[in-house]
Amino acid sequence: MTPQRFIRTTLLPSPAQKSHIRDCTRSCAPPPRDNPEILSSIRPELARYDAEILRLKNELNTLEQDQLELLMYYGASQSKS
């Protein structure tokens, strides 16, 4: 095998790997800023995510308060024993 052939076949990605790399970089790339259709479809989706995040934060806050009250109650009941 010649050195050029070795480099070409061993070190460079295969066509399947090239396709996979293209798919990966395409999926990780930020959306183009010049496409108003993409931006207009993303805004409602982001608003839905923001609303869900807020709902979950409120639920977490409630659960943390409940946990604190239970810990205080448990601590008070342990000190009486």
Image (cartoon, rainbow, N blue to C red):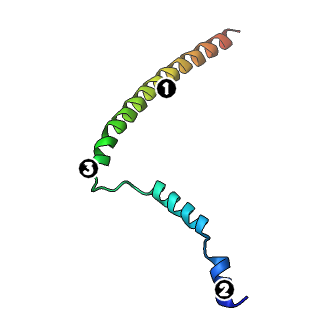
Q: Amino acid at mark 2?
A: Arg
Residue 5 disc label: 2
Q: Is residue 64 left or right of residue 30?
A: right
| Marks 3,2: beta carbons within 8 A | no
Q: Is residue 4 left or right of residue 50?
A: right
Using the numbered discs, state the Cα–Cα distance from disc 2 to disc 1 in whole angstroms: 60 Å
Q: Which residue is mark 1?
A: 60
Circle 1 SS class: helix
Residue 24 disc label: none
If the image is split into quadrants, where does the C terminus sit? Answer: top right
Q: Which residue is mark 3?
A: 36
Residue at point 36%, 37% (across, down): 45
Q: Amino acid at mark 3?
A: Pro
Residue at point 47%, 23% (across, down): 59
Q: Depth-wise, is mark 3 or mark 1 nearer the camera?
A: 3
Of residues 71 and 39, the one nearer the viewer is: 39
If the image is split into quadrants, where does the N terminus sit? Answer: bottom right
